[in-house]
Image (spheres, grey):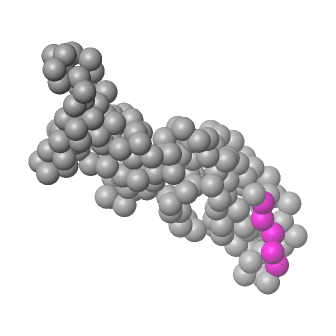
Amino acid sequence: MTRTPTPCIYVASLADYNAGRHHGVWIDADQDADEIRARIKAMLDRSPTGDAEDYAIHDYENFGPVELSEFTSIDDVATLAKLVTEHPPELVAHFQGEGYAVDAIGDEIEDRSRGVWDSLADLALEDIGDDLPERFQDHRWTLAKAIANDWEQSGSYLTIRTSDGVAVLSND
């Protein structure tokens, strides 16, 4: 799997923003939520306005299709950043789009993932293995494609296109 560059967020002081100033900082998001909060507090403490207490996420990078809002909780930011560094971001975004709570996405991926493959037929080929009778060995790929087609038609598996191939999720 291709490693996603470090997910990061740009956090800005709202007091400065409302005063017409641009004051904020880029923060690596793939760290403990308390560390992110400490970096935000340090940025707010350096505010030229002097009374900065509130902040918003004004930008983010390297989360793939995962979406953050201005007020996504820092706990959720840290969790999503960890998830997109461990799993295909497209897979994380799928569960986010399905309405799963952020803290449940990792468990859902772990429970349902069959890995990332070039195609669903490649997973079927792996499942077939070498246990076929000799007379069928030359037809392994044809059989794998038929099994993959059956899986798709029956809804046994969900596939999600990623930058690394096809993420396969069990629907059982």
Q: Looking at the figure, which quarter contains the C terminus?
A: top left
Write the residue at 17% across / 42% down: 146
Say left or right for 136 vs 81.
left
Say left or right for 144 vs 34.
left
Prevailing secondary structure of the magenta residues: loop
Tell which of 59 and 91 is nearer to you. Answer: 91
Write the residue at 73% across / 68% down: 13
Residue 14 visible: yes
Residue 36 visible: no
**Figure quadrant of residue 22:** bottom right
**Figure quadrant of residue 151:** top left
Residue 11 counted in the magenta span:
no
How many discs appear? 0
Q: Give the magenta part as a residue range.
A: 21-25
Say left or right for 153 vs 92.
left
Q: Looking at the figure, which quarter contains the N terminus?
A: top right
Residue 147: horizontal and vertical position, in percent?
A: 18, 38
Write the residue at 63% across / 55% down: 62
**17 lies above or below 84:** below
**Figure quadrant of residue 133:** top left
**99 lies above or below 59:** above
Residue 38: horizontal and vertical position, in percent?
A: 72, 46
Residue 22 counted in the magenta span:
yes
Tell which of 163 and 29 is nearer to you. Answer: 163
